[in-house]
Amino acid sequence: MDGPNRLEVLAISPNRLWKVGVGDLSEIDITFLSENLDAAYHPAGEHLLAFGTDADGQYGLWLATNQGTDPLLLAFDGLATMSDPAWTWL
């Protein structure tokens, strides 16, 4: 089941990003970066932020759907280290 009432947590490793269902432990691979450093769901659960590197070597902060599709590079800096993505109303 993959729907609006499904409870999930993000799991991350350097080369994989996936969702794990709470209660049933089912896994859905949503990897869209070559290297994953950190990720966070939007509170509504429809999008996520991720820090990492894409297939072309571009490091930055990415926005994607909760399925790992339509990634959009939001910010990048080759000299900066980004971590702990978070959502805020401010």
Image: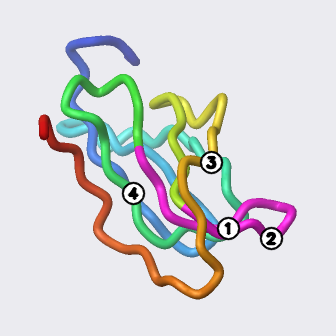
Residue 53 image label: 1
Amino acid found under the numbered disc labelled 3: Leu
| Element assignment for label 2 | loop
| Element assignment for label 4 | strand
- Camera-near label (3 vs 1) is 3
Q: Which residues are magenta?
A: 49-60
Q: Quadrant of the N terminus?
A: top left
Is there a contact, CB below 8 Å, between mark 1 and mark 2? Answer: yes
Amino acid found under the numbered disc labelled 1: Thr
> Could you say which is closer to the camera, residue 43 or residue 24?
43
Q: Which residue is mark 4?
A: 39
Cα gap from disc 4 to disc 2, whole angstroms: 18 Å
- Residue at (44% x, 64% y) in the render: 12
- Return the disc, 2 or 3, that comes first in the chain's sequence: 2
Position of residue 29 in the picture relative to residue 66 (left or right): right
Residue 57 image label: 2
Task: Answer few, some or many: residues within 10 Å of disc 1's Cα (few below 14, many 20 plus, some between 14 and 19).
Answer: many
Q: Which residue is mark 3?
A: 73
